[in-house]
Image (cartoon, grey):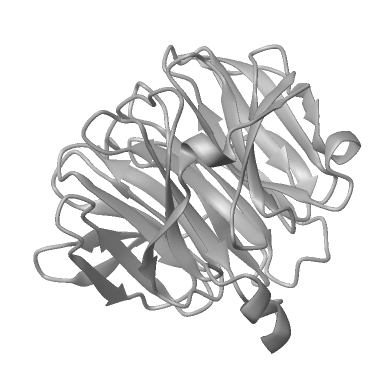
Amino acid sequence: MALNLTASANPRQLLDVGSKLGEGAFWDAERQVVWFVDIKQQRLWHYDPATGSNAMARAPGQIGWALPADNGLLLCGLQDGLYTFDPARQSFEKLTDVPGEPAHNRLNDACTDPWGRVWFGSMDDREAEASGRFYVFDRGEIRAAGPSGIAITNGPAVNAQGDRIYFTDTTAQKIMVADLSPAGVGEARVFADTGALFPDAYPDGPVVDSEDHVWTALYLGSRVARFSPDGELVAQIEFAARDITKLCLGGPELRTGFVTTATKNLEPAQLAQFPHAGSLIGFDAPVAGFAQTRVRLG
């Protein structure tokens, strides 16, 4: 039976920002802040857990993620392509389109691997057509890589060794895994059928910890779940928010969980039932994460 770690995890509201669709939590080890976005309100946030200070920048479109790059900028995935964000100037600049992406698609979630490549997914903004797929951004070049034909992509997530990558098909309630190397990615296979464990919830943004276990957010599930490297559910943590969208592990010891949430499908009575909906939530993780590699832009 999976351990329920809610009491020991001490879930707490860190920042009430009223996100409609919070996403993209990412720990910036150099700046010691967590970056996250509100896709629907086109906002890029950062939060400093040491001081509680935070700030928001308005993106020029729906923004799915922001990852620190090796030149002080952030690489961001917006609806119409990849942008850079300059924190000093608070400005976005279009870098490139994603070739072949339908106009009704947008970018949703992303991660880096140990070589500084960015793995990211696209999806139908209407959450209906299976027009989404996964890509890799490799020093300026974008190519399709990984599963395709997905309505709502989430992840990817790469382990510390860089030999495994996890892709989430949210609608199908499945997390997939593939072998990874500097040369590319292998064929994806089912890692966990979350629908069999949480039939009323949907796997959302994942992350891998330092023990090679996979954590996933659960949309409609009010929780995150932790899976062993062989796909066994081993732990879960519950929150006072229904729609959990993404998590990362950060803080000075990399043992603080940062969780994004959503409110876009909640009625007023449900908002009262879930007081931390739309917030950035924190929890004490039972194991550390690992420092993520910065994006190599060129």
Observer able to see residue 100: no
Looking at the picture, tell me which residue is in the foreground, 208 or 270.
270
Q: Residue at x 47, y 78 (%)?
A: 18
Image position of 14 with respect to 238: above or below = below
Q: Residue at x 74, y 72 (%)?
A: 126
Task: Provide residue 142's location: percent of width, then percent of height.
Answer: 48, 42
Residue lying farthest bottom? 268
Task: Provide residue 139's location: percent of width, then percent of height.
Answer: 33, 35
Quick check: 131 left or right of 295? right
Look at the image and tell me in which quarter the C terminus lies: top left
Observer able to see residue 255: yes
Quick check: 194 left or right of 270? right
Look at the image and tell me in which quarter the N terminus lies: top right
Task: Provide residue 125's location: percent of width, then percent of height.
Answer: 68, 69
Q: Quadrant of residue 3?
A: top right
Quick check: 112 left or right of 275? left
Task: Provide residue 41's location: percent of width, then percent of height.
Answer: 47, 80
Image position of 267 with respect to 287: above or below = below
Q: Residue at x 59, y 61 (%)?
A: 240
Image position of 100 with respect to 257: above or below = below
Residue lying farthest front? 7
Q: Residue at x 90, y 35 (%)?
A: 196
Looking at the picture, tell me which residue is in the foreground, 48 or 163.
48
Q: Quadrant of residue 236?
A: top right
Q: How many marks?
A: 0
Residue lying farthest left? 88
